[in-house]
Image: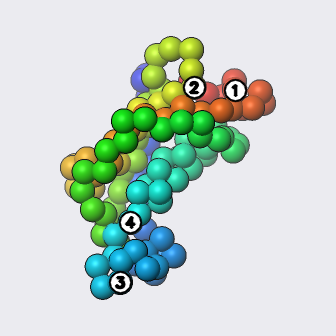
Amino acid sequence: LDSGEISAELQIPPESQWFSGHFPGQPILPGIAQLTLVRDIISQACGGPVTVSAFSRVKFKKMVRPGRLLRIMATPKQGPDDAYTFRILVEDEVVCSGNLTLRIDGKNRDQIK
């Protein structure tokens, strides 16, 4: 993609540990799990581990139930930082959005953007 957008689709199975205890009888995907998924797709695109140094303007707009198909998109922001805007969609509705900044070691830096 010309924009450098990274995207992935995945489904978190109902038996995933992410749903354990969050919440009994009404399971939802925790916000930390959603942010971890965003980091993971960027990490895969970079070919190695990345560390998030900051999140900003994160909004959790809708609850994510077990078994839903998630579409995760991250787009590099213009500027000197290794920063991205991201969105998570379920059925074309944004369930989570925000910005993240990465701390990237030298060997992976060339693969970003």
Query: Which residue bears the numbered disc 1?
Result: 109
Work out whether mark 4 precedes mark 3 in sequence or the reverse, and give the earlier one.
Answer: 3
| Mark 1 residue element | helix
Residue at image position (40%, 47%) is 72
**x and y percentages locating residue 107 in the rendered image:** 78, 30
In the rendering, which numbered label is found on residue 72? none
**x and y percentages locating residue 110 in the rendered image:** 69, 24
Mark 2 crowdedness (10 Å alpha carbons): few <14, some 14-19, many ≥20:
some
Work out whether mark 3 precedes mark 1 in sequence or the reverse, and give the earlier one.
Answer: 3
| Mark 2 residue element | loop
**Contact? badges 1 and 2 (CB < 8 Å):** yes
Query: Which residue bears the numbered disc 4?
Result: 29
Residue at image position (25%, 51%) is 61
Tell me how far mark 4 sits from mark 3, CA to CA: 12 Å
Mark 3 crowdedness (10 Å alpha carbons): few <14, some 14-19, many ≥20:
few
Report the quarter where the C terminus lies.
Answer: top right
Tell me how far mark 3 sits from mark 1, CA to CA: 42 Å
Mark 1, mark 2: which one is toward the viewer? Answer: 2
Query: Which residue bears the numbered disc 3?
Result: 24
Mark 3, mark 1: which one is toward the viewer? Answer: 3
Work out whether mark 3 precedes mark 2 in sequence or the reverse, and give the earlier one.
Answer: 3
Query: Which residue bears the numbered disc 2?
Result: 82
Residue 11 seen by the camera: no
Q: What's the amino acid at mark 3?
A: Pro
- On the picture, is 54 further left or further right than 64? right
- On the picture, is 3 further left or further right than 101? left
**Contact? badges 1 and 4 (CB < 8 Å):** no
Report the quarter where the N terminus lies.
Answer: top left
**Contact? badges 2 and 4 (CB < 8 Å):** no
User: Which quadrant of the figure has residue 23?
Assistant: bottom left
Q: What's the amino acid at mark 4?
A: Leu
